[in-house]
Image (cartoon, grey):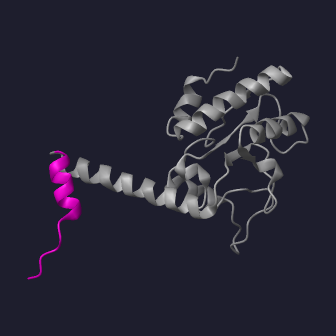
């Protein structure tokens, strides 16, 4: 049975609970079927909007076109930003190879209800990528909720007093002078 290592746990700790349970089931089923292990690479779990912006900027050439072989979604459109996606890499296999293990990973992911990046219809196929089966509109709504939660937490941290003050700061109408 596959277990997540401490570095992997840190990479996936902010995934949505349903996605995290799918990830662990995915790893275990892949190992059961093939005898091979998989792991979550760096940047393979939840990403901040800032980190997604960096990855996307790195994927563009000087003229603003996506470099060949790069697969970063624009900030705000990545399922990683809402905790709805993860990457799985096979131990000993490069992601850009035609290793048959990635087809097995894709089949297992799809059986678990995920969209496999290996079978993307648009853009560059991404054999390591798996995301929930949600529309872009849903992803944008989820992202808005994530931003709202982060702003709310920031308001509480800034006040240092508590929820009552946080609510007062957040919803207090501006006075006209």
- Above or below, 141 relative to 102: below
Task: Tell me which segment is drawn in magenta.
Answer: 162-177
**Residue 163 lies within the magenta run:** yes
Image-based side of 176 in relation to 145, left or right: left
Q: Position of residue 71 (x, y in %)?
A: 73, 56
Q: Position of residue 96 (x, y in %)?
A: 84, 45
Image-based side of 162 in relation to 112, left or right: left
Q: Residue at x 59, y 49 (%)?
A: 80
Q: Position of residue 130 (x, y in %)?
A: 70, 45
- Above or below, 115 relative to 89: below
Q: Quadrant of residue 53?
A: bottom right
Image-based side of 33 in relation to 43, left or right: right
- Above or below, 88 relative to 24: below
Is residue 75 shown to the viewer in this render?
no
Image-based side of 103 in relation to 51, left or right: right
Q: Quadrant of residue 29?
A: top right
Q: Residue at x 50, y 56 (%)?
A: 142
**Residue 78 lies within the magenta run:** no
Q: Residue furthest top?
A: 1
Q: Position of residue 123 (x, y in %)?
A: 78, 62
Q: Is the C terminus in the top left, top right, bottom left or bottom right quadrant?
A: bottom left
Numbered marks: total = 0
Q: Residue at x 67, y 47 (%)?
A: 131
Is residue 112 shown to the viewer in this render?
yes
Q: Quadrant of residue 58?
A: bottom right
Q: Residue furthest bottom?
A: 177
Q: Is the N terminus in the top left, top right, bottom left or bottom right quadrant?
A: top right
Q: Residue furthest left?
A: 177
In front of the other: 121 or 5: 121
């Amino acid at each position: 049975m596959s277990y997540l290592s401490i570095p992997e746990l840190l990479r996936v700790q902010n995934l949505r609970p349903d996605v995290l349970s799918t990830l662990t089931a995915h790893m275990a089923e892949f190992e059961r079927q093939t005898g091979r292990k998989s792991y979550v690479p760096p940047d393979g779990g939840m990403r901040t909007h800032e980190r997604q912006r960096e990855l996307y900027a790195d994927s563009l050439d000087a003229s603003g076109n996506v470099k060949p072989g790069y697969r970063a979604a624009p900030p705000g459109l990545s399922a990683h930003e809402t905790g709805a996606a993860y990457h799985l890499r096979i131990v000993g296999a490069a992601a850009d190879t035609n290793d048959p293990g990635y087809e097995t990973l894709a089949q297992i992911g799809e059986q678990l209800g995920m969209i496999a990046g290996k079978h993307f219809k648009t853009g560059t196929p991404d054999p390591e990528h798996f995301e929930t089966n949600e529309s872009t509109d849903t992803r944008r709504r989820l992202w808005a909720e994530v931003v709202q939660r982060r702003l709310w937490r920031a308001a509480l941290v800034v006040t240092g007093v508590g929820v009552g003050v946080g609510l007062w700061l957040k919803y207090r109408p501006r006075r006209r002078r």
